[in-house]
Image (cartoon, grey):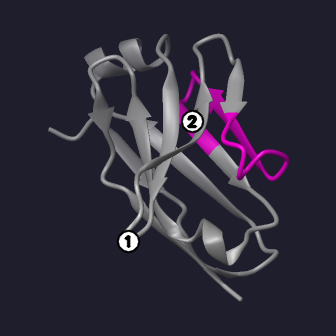
Amino acid sequence: QVHLVESGGGLVQAGGSLRLSCAASGSIFKTIFKITTVGWYRQAPGKQRELVAQITNGGITMYGDSVKGRFTMSRDNAKNEVYLQMNSLKPEDTAVYYCHSSSGDYWGQGTQVTVSS
């Protein structure tokens, strides 16, 4: 059963922006999603999975060194969604991006982000 769904990926030129969304589904999981830590991860072919950003239920964020100053994570508990605003995109940001819920260890299906030079 699907609990997390990512959207917003696509193809952009270097220097462009994208906004990714992660939506929780299911009445029971939505109540848990509101009060748990959620993270964005990414993985490119031949590379290990990388933590991009993380946000607590209280809105405290942390970012990977490679995206600091360019990406911003936020959440809207009323809508049961979390977001990743990506600015000044670089070709090395190309990867599949995944949403993860700490409670239940749930992963989304992933959304492809491709940045051309």
Asked if one can make out residue 63 in the rendered structure from this viewpoint, the answer is yes
**Viewer-closest of 52 and 35:** 52
Indicate left or right for 60 with 31 as reference. right
Residue at 51% in and 34% down: 39
Q: Which residue is mark 1?
A: 45
In the rendered structure, which disc, 1 or 2, sits on the residue that comes first in sequence?
1
* Residue 82, disc: 2
Q: Is residue 78 found inside the magenta-colored segment of the image?
A: yes
Residue at 62% in and 66% down: 93
Q: Classify 30 as above or below 95.
A: above
Q: Position of residue 116 (x, y in %)?
A: 65, 86
Q: Position of residue 6 (x, y in %)?
A: 43, 51
Q: Quadrant of the C terminus?
A: bottom right
Tell me which segment is drawn in magenta.
Answer: 63-83
Residue at 58% in and 13% down: 57
**Viewer-closest of 31 and 46:** 46
